[in-house]
């Protein structure tokens, strides 16, 4: 068994057109995978494919809104036809949340966070299961957050959604084990992406998170999430299922 070889394994990455998803797509491609970038903005999806490699035949862009089961099903159909079979999927697409106290939050905004993050992961994995079973083995990875474990004031919606994703993955890992499909989460800490641009602009908050909350005293780059995904996706992670890998600079022990 080659430990970190993804040669010609086809993997869908939702939200792969920027931020963590783009870094994951690029990283998997470097290890030999065929990568399908699935997000709403198809122009940006295509630009992301070109940025990974303008000449590669191992990148494909597909329009996909994870909040809509039909859109996800259609995206997976196109991905499977293009690749000739699917081996893996990373449910990475997500939104941060309302940023509002629970006694003031608008119920629609709260639901929208749950829909994009939790239901989006459910829609994605539901569409992935049939092709992965047909392939005969597979890997599902969801992107959780340390908000699933740690209280995050003003983000009850986001914390609930990410904690839900953790539960979904553990239950699904049992369901899919007989099919040789592993299911795991990666749990990033603070990562420097568009999602946190406003926090980064608030210099005092940014510095206090780094100095007081993160033992490694810095935020992560999106590229620092790649190793865990390659490990779980490849032969190296073949006996690893139903688990969460924390990539948080030690936040959980700090
Ligand atoms: P960004 O905001 O940088 O990127 C979000 C990505 O998700 C984009 O590609 C976006 O593409 C896509 N997306 C959003 N909504 C949808 C949708 N309805 N359907 C399809 N695609 C969608 O976020 P990050 O890269 O920072 O975050 C990626 C994941 O990591 C998220 O799940 C986030 O919760 C999680 N995470 C991030 C952390 C951080 O510190 N940045 C920390 C912990 C977890 P488009 O708009 O084109 O659809």
Image: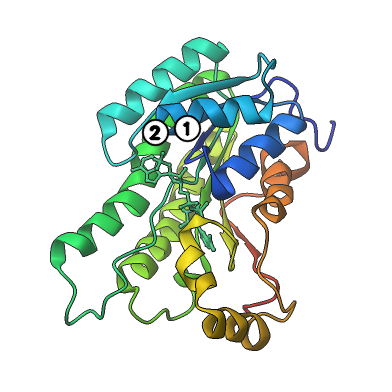
Left or right? Give the position of 76 relative to 190.
left
Asked which quadrant contains residue 8, the reply is: top right
Vertical arrangement, residue 42 with respect to residue 162, above or below: above
> Disc 1 marks which residue?
44
Query: Pointer 2: what residue?
Result: 41
Residue 154 occupies which quadrant of the picture?
bottom left
Image location of residue 168, percent across then percent down: 41, 53
Number of numbered discs: 2
Mark 2 element type: loop
Tell me if I can see residue 35 in this picture: no
Q: Are marks 2 and 1 in contact (CB under 8 Å)?
A: yes
Q: In this view, does 87 lie to the left or right of 149?
A: right
Specify the quadrant that holds the C terminus. Answer: bottom right
Is residue 123 found left or right of 186 in the rendered image?
A: left
> Where is 80 relative to 126, above or below?
above
Q: Position of residue 138 (x, y in %)?
A: 59, 31
């Amino acid at each position: 068994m080659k430990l970190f070889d993804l040669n010609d394994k086809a993997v869908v990455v939702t939200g792969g057109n920027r931020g963590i998803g783009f870094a994951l797509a690029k990283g998997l491609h470097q290890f030999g995978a065929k990568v399908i970038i699935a997000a709403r903005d198809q122009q940006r999806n295509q630009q992301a494919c070109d940025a990974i490699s303008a000449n590669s035949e191992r990148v494909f862009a597909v329009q996909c809104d994870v909040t809509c089961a039909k859109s996800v099903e259609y995206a997976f159909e196109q991905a499977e036809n293009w690749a000739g079979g699917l081996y893996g999927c990373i449910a990475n697409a997500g939104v941060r949340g309302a940023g509002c106290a629970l006694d003031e939050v608008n119920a629609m905004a709260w639901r929208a966070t749950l829909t994009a993050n939790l239901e989006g992961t459910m829609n994605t994995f539901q569409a992935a299961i049939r092709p992965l079973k047909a392939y005969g083995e597979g890997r599902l990875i969801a992107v959780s957050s340390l908000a699933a474990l740690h209280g995050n004031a003003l983000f009850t919606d986001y914390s609930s959604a990410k904690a839900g994703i953790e539960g979904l993955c553990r239950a699904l890992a049992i369901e899919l084990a007989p099919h040789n499909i592993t299911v795991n989460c990666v749990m990033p800490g603070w990562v420097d992406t568009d999602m946190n641009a406003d926090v980064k602009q608030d210099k005092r908050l940014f510095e206090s998170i780094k100095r007081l909350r993160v033992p490694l005293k810095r935020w992560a780059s999106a590229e620092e999430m790649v190793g865990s995904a390659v490990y779980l996706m490849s032969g190296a992670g073949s006996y690893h299922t139903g688990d969460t890998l924390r990539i948080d600079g030690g936040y959980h022990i700090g």
